[in-house]
Image (spheres, rainbow, N blue to C red):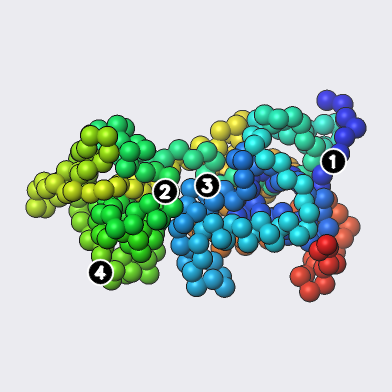
Amino acid sequence: MEAVFTEVFDVTIVGGGPVGLFGATLASLHGMKVKIIESLPELGGQLYALYPEKPVYDVAGFPEVRAKDLALSLIAQMDRLHPTVVLKESVESVENLEDGTFVLRTTGGEHYSRTILLAVGIGSFTPRRLPAQQAELFEGKGLHYFVPPLETFTDQHVLVVGGGDTAVDWALAVSKKAHKVSIVHRRNEFRAQEDSVRQLFDTPNIVVITPAEVEEIFGHQQVTGVRVKHHETGGTELAVDAIIGGLGFHPNLGAVKSWGIEFKGSTIKVSLDSMLTSREGIWAVGDAVYYPGKVKLIATGFGEVGIAVAQIRSYLHPGVTGLPHSTTLKNKQH
């Protein structure tokens, strides 16, 4: 394919979640010409679109921060360096020109870049729906997979289903507004962070029901109750005002799987020492990647993007030695 005269960026970051935002900041600080492409109408990824009210406890320097506030802080940090931002476009294909430049074809046009950094998280947000009878009838009628503002649950009895970080964090957050929170999990052991589980059992208005499963949801135009099957004591019915499905989301990286990149299951395989994928010029970071010992945390993603940006800089400028630090970088704020 012949080269086309157009604006070419040093690095194009696909994904506007927390790791992608921090990547745009670091790459800009390192003197790169940066573009970020996000399929959603706003930046922030899962933090902003799925969990805006969710408290986050595992980011350095923040004892507790709302997911939405963390996202807005990352956006403000990036905006001071003025990278190019493209919203509401999904990258459908990636191709190389003869000179090695990448062409990223999106739902809105074409973009040109010397390198690509994938920070696509879990991809599209498809919730794992509750297997309970009649669950599909009550979506948007008291059954939530995408949680509304916490004030929605003021003085209510809210049922949360699940045993991972999503469910436990939501139970803790909702308990600050709800009269009562019940959390149902099919096992006695929770998969969430230990401190969050400790808080769960220590919170007076949270009732833990394990090992159990929600069998059926009741109501007319709105959720009014559920039937819970306890694996040890049998079935029971609970009157509830709202249900939160906290079983997580199905990862779907969509078109990325056709870009000639090696995968391990549903994640992108990268080199631990560089975050480089199997395709030259394309790096990947965050929840989308796999390497031995991978831990899916925002903090981990921030570290990975630091490695990737350093490697991209060396790739773009092979004769440059040493790595700039925050204390020596040129002040690009305006």
Q: Name the residue under label 4.
A: 204
Residue at 11%, 48% (x, y): give it: 236
Q: Mark 2 points at which residue?
A: 147
Helix, strand or loop at mark 2: loop
Q: Nearer the viewer, mark 1 or mark 3?
A: 3
For marks 2 and 1, the one nearer the N-term is 1
Q: Name the residue under label 1.
A: 8
Helix, strand or loop at mark 3: helix
Rendered position, 224 above or below 149 = above
Q: Nearer the viewer, mark 1 or mark 4?
A: 4
Give the percent coordinates (x, y) of residue 214.
22, 44
For marks 4 and 2, the one nearer the N-term is 2
Residue 333 vs residue 153, the one in the foreground: 153
Q: Is residue 148 visible?
A: yes
Residue at 25%, 69% (x, y): give it: 204
Q: Can residue 322 be seen in this view?
A: no
Residue at 67%, 29% (x, y): give it: 107
Residue at 29%, 47% (x, y): give it: 242
Rendered position, 53 above or below 200 = above
Helix, strand or loop at mark 4: loop
Q: Mark 3 points at which residue?
A: 49
Assess whether mark 4 and mark 1 are in contact (beta carbons under 8 angstroms): no
Tag 4: amino acid: Pro
Q: Distance between the residues labelled 1 and 4?
A: 57 Å
For marks 2 and 3, the one nearer the N-term is 3
For marks 4 and 3, the one nearer the N-term is 3
Q: Which of marks 2 and 1 is in front?
A: 2
Q: How crowded is mark 1: few (under 14 residues within 10 Å), some or many (20 or more)?
A: some
Residue 93 vs residue 289, the one in the foreground: 93
For marks 1 and 4, the one nearer the N-term is 1
